Amino acid sequence: MHVLSAGDNFVLPELFRDALRERVGSQTDLTFSEVTFPWPQVPFGPVGTVQEATGSIHEMIAAASGADIAVTQLAPFTKEVFDACPSLKFVGVSRGGPVNVDLEAATAAGVRVSFAPGRNAQAAAEFTIGLMLAAMRHISEADAELKRGTWRGDYYSHDSAGTELGGSTVGLVGYGAIGRIVARVLIAFGAEVITYDPYAKPADIESDGVGMVSLDELVQRSNVISLHARLTPETEHIINAERLHRMLPGTVIVNAARGGLLDYAPLPELLRSGHIGALALDVYDEEPPGPEWPLFDAPNVVLSPHLAGASQQTAERAASIIAGEAARFIAGEPLQHLANPDVLNH
């Protein structure tokens, strides 16, 4: 059985290869080929019919020719690839969702597709807390000013001083794996945590010591709002202009999930007026933002280039999860994270 390890500069091809060899042992006859795509040095984007991928369809066809199994993070698997590579029977995607795979085409071709939920939950949760602290305590601004030779002692004045997480009400929009870790850390700080997630289990939320509320109540009660929902047609701009205006004066907003969850257009004015106290972003409506992006000039904004999931452990964990799925496929066992269950009818 031939395995294509289609890695990049984050989830390296050898991480997939070594993890799969460890899972299946030396008794299973596997051959490997490898290709490395240039992400993250080259941004991902739409490729054919898939929205977040790196490399070209032509490159993918050439690399996957003759492969029975392909494991990847961002390589494009479009209908053209499946049509040109009939030997493919399994594709493992080391992401929280297989957005770089045309699932309809995969199902029609009889290819099982697995993904890696939770692979970056710890990293993204830790990063989210970092963004909160940076925004609430002027960490990024003070660092930049001091490096320019300005000692911002005025941040000790009462009107300019930061605020604490302890005693704050923090609203989490979405309560999946990342949100639950964030909640535990916030509770340890002494924050009151509330959440809106119509799909989360109420028993899990209650057992974590978190309050389950409507989105309107969350918007109107929270001192800090952090976004953790998946981006779907239902959640696009879930925090829109109307909800932004109904937030408490001085609310801090953190988004390390997906840019489309938040309506960015009203934010520069709301930041300048002080209605939004601070904004911390790791994701954007356009990535990377253009040079004239209005929030570059807005006050109290902390920015990072989509780094929340970027830890070495995330890459290793992602490769391990997908290696487990590939090993189950090889052994003829049920997959734990099958993205296209209709393929079982083929």
Image (cartoon, helix red, strand yellow):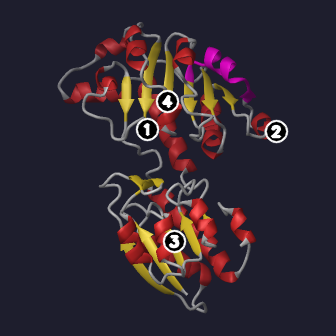
* Residue that numbered label 2 is attached to: 203
Q: Is residue 96 above or below residue 77?
A: above
Closer mark to the observer between disc 3 and disc 1: 3
The residue at 59%/86% (across/down) is 25
Task: Name the disc covering residue 283, or none.
Answer: 1
Q: Secondary structure at mark 2?
A: helix
Q: Is residue 214 magenta?
A: yes
- Identify residue type, mark 2: Ala
Q: Nearer the viewer, residue 26 or 230?
A: 230
The x, y position of residue 77, in whole percent, is 48, 65
- Identify residue type, mark 1: Val
Q: Secondary structure at mark 3?
A: helix
Task: Name the disc covering residue 261, or none.
Answer: none
Category of crowding for the residue at label 2, using alpha-carbon neighbours closer than 10 angstroms: few (below 14), some (14–19), many (at least 20): few
Q: Secondary structure at mark 1?
A: loop
Question: CA separation, marks 4 and 3?
Answer: 39 Å
* Residue that numbered label 3 is attached to: 82
